[in-house]
Image (tube, grey):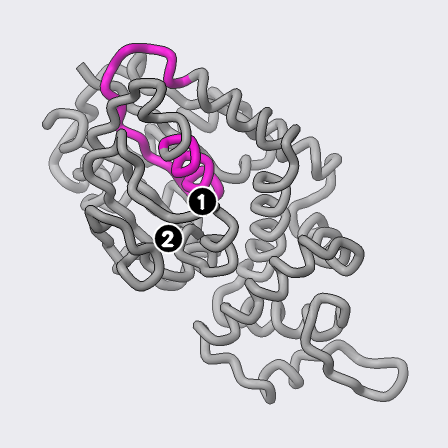
Amino acid sequence: MKELILIHGRSQQGKDSKALKRAWIEAWGRGLAAAGLSLPIPEERIRFPYYGDTLRDLLEGISEADAAKIIVRGAQEDDIAAGLLLALLNEYIAACGIGEDEIRRNLPPAAGPVVVERGPQNWRWVHAVLRTIDQRVPGSGVLIGLLTSDVSLYLRNTNVRGAINGGVLEAFDRPLDKVVVAHSLGTIVAYLLLRQVGSEAGWRVPALITLGSPLGIKAIRGRLGGVRHPDCVGRWFNARDPRDVVALYSLDERNFGVVPAIENKTDVHNRSSNRHGIEGYLEDPVIASRIHGALVG
């Protein structure tokens, strides 16, 4: 007997854990229907560990768009966050083929002489890069700001990491084989827990399915303390929309080389406005079928 564990990324505003779980299941159901399949297990065997309050509380009630601006500005005073932000932006510039002229066209007006210094200390440069990326896929600049905050907090703040890990670990309390589906920041949480805790705890995970994952980004990958296939995991399937800026790279040999290799699907057409939403991934019939197959196989 198997159960399904769903590990979310940044919480969706205005929804509680039950509503979020329902949204995941309904989106998966639409993907299954498109593939001619139906829900293979009762909902009692679908676990949805919710850690959204930990991240939501950090925003103190402000919108995610405003939070992203504050986070990016805050990186000016935080050397660790600044280093991550600079590394992320440089990767996006290279991966998206963004030229200096394009960045200059998006610079906010300057009160004095124009000096375009590359780095988080230069807010005008950061703003111009994010605006340029936003022009490619609307909403992407906000995602990058939030990604910087989420990853920085999770990897270096023991209280935040402990709260998130503690909530997710509760979903692994039953002695059943577990199919794990993780999205966004949740893929980092899932990967580290499976790698660090899974074998010792005796977890059996025949399939790990990661969606919209930032694990392949060098600036993030280099902060994970090494890269290897979790011993407790059987097959690993990863899917991304090529327009999803959070999932900048596939988890292939070049960007996340592990043995056995991860199978990648790189042609997802995520219908969400920023191409990163979980519903847009779960509605994909191939992804939905993979989850189904892992549970019934």
The reply, left or right, for residue 103 in relation to residue 259 is right
Q: Quadrant of residue 119?
A: bottom right
Q: Are marks 1 and 2 in contact (CB under 8 Å)?
A: no
**Residue that numbered label 1 is attached to:** 184
Q: Which range of residues does the magenta coloring cover?
A: 171-194
Residue 174 figure quarter: top left
Neighbor class of circle 1 (other Cα within 10 Å; few <14, some 14-19, many 20+) is many
Magenta-colored stretch includes residue 54: no
Left or right of 12 in this view: 117:
right
Q: Secondary structure at mark 1?
A: loop
Q: Which numbered mark, 1 or 2, is in the foreground of this view? A: 1
What secondary structure is found at the residue carrying circle 2?
loop
Which amino acid is tagged 2?
Answer: Arg
Could you say where residue 168 lies in the image, as x and y percent from the top left?
46, 24
What residue is shown at x 68% (from left), y 53% (from top)? 80
Name the residue nearer the viewer: 283 or 245.
245
The amino acid pointed to by label 1 is Ser
Quarter of the image where the C terminus is located: top left
Q: Residue at x 54, y 69 (%)?
A: 133
The residue under label 2 is 271
Q: Earlier in the sequence, mark 1 or mark 2?
A: 1
x, y (%) of residue 18? 47, 20
Looking at the image, residue 76 lies above or below residue 152? below
Say if the magenta span includes residue 190.
Answer: yes
Q: Position of residue 239 (x, y in %)?
A: 29, 50
Q: 133 and 79: which one is in front?
A: 79
For the N terminus, the image quarter is top left
The residue at the point 54 percent across, 85 percent down is: 99
